[in-house]
Image: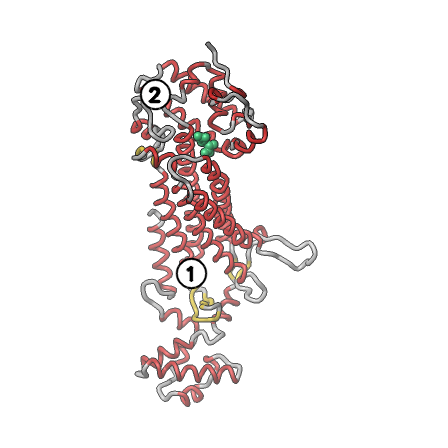
Amino acid sequence: MKHKSAGGKLWGGRFTESTDAFVESFTASVEFDQRLYRYDIQGSCAHARMLCKVGVISAAERDAILGGLDQIEQAIERGEFEWSVSLEDVHMNIEARLTAMIGDAGKKLHTGRSRNDQVATDLRLYLRDQIDAACRELLRLQEGLLTVAEREFDTLLPGFTHLQVAMPVTFGHHMLAWFENLQRDRQRLLECRARVNVMPLGAAALAGTSFPIDRHYTAELLGFDRPAENSLDAVSDRDFVIEFCACAALLLTHLSRFSEELILWASTQFDFVDLPDRFCTGSSIMPQKKNPDVPELVRGKSGRVIGNLVGLLTLMKGQPLAYNKDNQEDKEPLFDTVDTLLGCLRAFADMIPAIRVKADNMRLAAATGYSTATDLADYLVRKGVPFRDAHEIVGAAVRLGIDSKRELSELSLTELQALSGNIEQDVFRVLTPEGSVSSRNHFGGTAPQQVEAAVERARKRLGN
Ligand code: ARG
């Protein structure tokens, strides 16, 4: 006897009235989860092969399923697949089409499986690919930073603390600071990938299945490191989504800070760098404007990604085991985070090597603001003056400079000697920004020689 379900739903057997029209669209996810179709099909193919291997379906049924899914994938890729909201999500749209195409064999595909383990599997396959894509873009950006660091290994600019001139640094050293941030971000993504790459399939709805499934075989087919240990955990937790979004939020926080520097540096007041025209836009009213839109947008978009992270944590925190429909809400923030992250990385990877550095302006800024005051204090210490006394003496020299509108290097030897008898002619060498940076010549320091060595080490570390 043919059983006809209420409203034609795949799950309609126990229902007597069809779904409210609004509820149907309210509960549907197909509009956004259709983006998982390739992974859904990949997972279904592996599941079908496994069902055949353990004798639950025949080889003919398996082949019909594989052939049908292949045709469906092609139809989707050609834009010829009609998605139906009444079929709720990507999983049931594909399964219904498969059955329409190949008949009863299609109805057997869902044996020993549930949408709960299916969706968690799809998401993990999807995210694994996206992490790989993000790491590729990140690598490209890091390589760009190394190119700039190498080129500008001895270019001077002021280093800041509290956004006040602190000490001269080299531009190469500054670029390498961002390289280090991003290196940790890439390691974090790779560590996250290892936890993503675990297979939920076989957990079924929550408790596993009564069929003699071979989860290790399915995991191997899908390139997962292993099947998840616990079925309840496998279908219910989205910590891997949250972890990825945390990695993305941190990465974009770094790019946001970097953006802020580029925006400052490109301003008329700083005038340290020129961003290529192709990364900027103009104003519709002020003809002189060239706005640093790309860094501004990256700074802005980081806020959305941080919001997605907080949203996902909040989504998860009240859920009892095992699967709850709440989890359908994980997809849009995840997809948005992936798109935003990939976009920002691409923009930065393209832009960074194309930045033009205004070395003269930066050199001038590095030589002003008493940036070498600490060098003078260190000089006095080397002449035997205790550091606290040296600090006091240099403070007086700075005061003299401020009062007479001169830099330390513009004070005369006689004026300096009036402050400390230990000062000699050789003092002027330490008062230049070049002297200052080249004296910071130790592992991790800003001296040009150190920058060259650090770039070389960084190239080797890119492989890890
Ligand atoms: N669309 C659902 C999701 O994204 C798929 C799993 C639905 N499972 C269920 N038992 N209703 O989470």
Using residue 322 as the reference point, say whether residue 265 is left or right of it. right
Q: Position of residue 352 (x, y in %)?
A: 49, 53
Instruction: Name the disc covering residue 83, or none.
Output: none
**What residue does disc 1 label?**
172
Image quadrant, ligand 1: top left
Taking 276 as reference, is 205 above or below it? Answer: above
Answer with mark 1 or mark 2, whichever residue precedes in sequence: 2
Task: Please say if the residues under marks 1 and 2 sit with CB atoms less than 8 Å apart.
Answer: no
Q: Tell me the residue at 36%/82% (across/down).
A: 390
**Residue behind mark 2:** 51
Crowd band around label 1 with a 10 angstrom C-alpha radius: few (<14), some (14–19), many (20+):
many
> Visible in this render: residue 10?
no
Can I make out residue 52 in this image? yes
- Residue 128: image quadrant is top left
**Whole-percent x and y of residue 215?**
31, 28
- Identify the image quadrant of residue 202: top left
Which residue sits at x=52%, y=34%?
32
Question: Tag 1: residue type?
Answer: Gly
Q: Position of residue 214 (x, y in %)?
A: 30, 25
- Image coordinates for residue 306, horizontal then vertical, percent: 48, 50
- Amino acid type at circle 2 is Leu
In the image shown, does 408 or 24 lie closer to the viewer?
24
